[in-house]
Image (tube, helix red, strand yellow):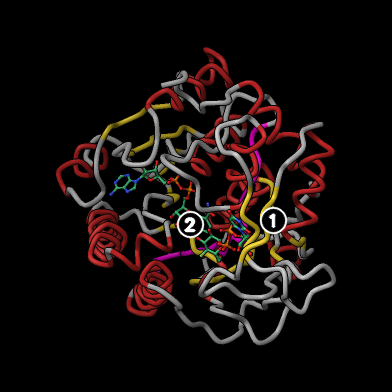
Amino acid sequence: MAIERNILVTGGAGFIGTHTAAALLRQGFKVWIIDNLDNAAAAAVDRLRNLVGPELSQNLHFQLGDIRNGDDLEKLFSQTQFDAVIHFAGLKAVGESVANPMRYFDNNLVGSITLYKIMAKYNCKKLVFSSSATVYGQPDKIPCLEDMELKAMNPYGRTKLFLEEIARDLHVADSKWRIILLRYFNPVSAHESGMLGEDPKGIPNNLMPYITQVAVGRLPELNVYGHDYPTPDGSAIRDYIHVVDLADGHVVALEKLLKHESIGCVAYNLGTGRGTSVLEMVDAFERASGKKIPIKLCPRRPGDATAVYASTEKAFRELGWKAKYGIDEMCRDQWKWASQNPWGYESKP
Ligand code: NAD
Ligand code: UFG
């Protein structure tokens, strides 16, 4: 009989969490989600159930709760011995973090510390943590390598940097902690079924959801922030990664964590290793959707780097993981999700 493996997924109702939960369920894991629905729809969990079907849905449990609340976590940990935690729960809007840093320190730092205390109490010391390429700041050298100097450019980035340091300290103090820090580059796109996708509240900050809302007629045009960068077409370059590739990266990281006793606390980039400019992304989306995306060339967005992309060698060497999809597939699946769900998980307001 297969061994039962119970995984707690914090923030599992969100964009990356739902896709990762789907991948985990398909690999035979039992998945417990805790999410306060601050930035997610309850309908996303229903969709996840429909996607995996009635049999695998029995292995999915959802608890509405907040990781800052020890009682919410106690409820879960006192009933189930978790083999590991994948920790997505957190706030992620850079601009909002500048305007309201305390909200970010409270949610991301206090939430994570509360979680780690309860994990230690219940002797669950295996953790996959959502870090970000933001910890490279505005990198002097590209591609970004895991051992490069780390810096924070804003309060959101400071929470990721600080949580990476906390993770390293936890392991130094107690080698039973096994921790994988996954530094995502720019997660985009949607499940190939069109059933799961990104559904930002309010006006999107990020490029892909903004382009999408222009394509479905919710927004009139895309502001292209910066057309005088020292890049071939003058727009900024990022490393976009398909969320399904990212989800698979979590499954392999988790398998490694469960197998290798001496893993320590280790960071991996999850990106494609390829840079795409804003204007190239607009072109690719127009091809995939058949829609014209009107653009307005605007000044640079403060704090933005010219070009950021990952070195993916360490993840390939040590996890055997490599992204499968390129920007054409990212735009194809994003368009499938958007055309089937132009207003996200809810119907038109
Ligand atoms: P998301 O907002 O879709 O998902 C985060 C989920 O956490 C949401 O469902 C939200 O309701 C939940 N949550 C927030 N605070 C909580 C709390 N205190 N208790 C319980 N639930 C809480 O974001 P995402 O894009 O899926 O990102 C997941 C993680 O990956 C975040 O930690 C984010 O910082 C990190 N990350 C995201 C990106 C990106 O561009 N999407 C890039 C790098 C890193
Ligand atoms: N952009 C536009 N118009 C828009 C939105 C974005 O031109 O409406 C441009 C940006 O100026 C940037 C590129 O598209 O050049 C990508 O911007 P995103 O906001 O999609 O992504 P960022 O690279 O700025 O930020 C992302 C995550 C952050 C994380 C950072 C570094 O959103 O959380 O990567 O990892 F901190």
Give how far apart the Cα atoms at labels 1 and 2 are. 21 Å
Q: Tag 1: Cα neighbours inside 10 Å, few (<14), some, or many (≥20)?
A: many
Left or right, residue 103 beside residue 97 = left
Label 2 neighbour load within 10 Å: few <14, some 14-19, many 20+: many
Closer to the eye: label 1 or 2: 1
* Residue 21 rendering spot, x and y as whole percentages: 52, 36
Task: Give, as a single range, the part of the protein colored magenta.
Answer: 176-191
Whether residue 315 is situated above or below residue 228 in the rendered picture: above
Observer-nearest residue: 284 or 41? 284
The quadrant holding residue 337 is top right
Q: Which residue shows up at 75% across the image and 59% down it?
A: 272
- Which element type, helix, strand or loop, lies under badge 2? strand
The answer to whether mark 1 and mark 2 are in CB contact below 8 A is no
| Residue position marked by numbered label 2 in the rendering | 128
> Which of the 4 image quarters holds residue 190?
top right
- Residue 240 is labelled as 1
> Looking at the picture, which amino acid does disc 1 mark?
Tyr
* Secondary structure category for the residue under label 1: strand
- Residue 346: x %, y % from top left: 44, 22
- Identify which residue is drawn at 48% across, 82% down: 151
Q: Is mark 2 within 8 Å of ligand 1?
A: no
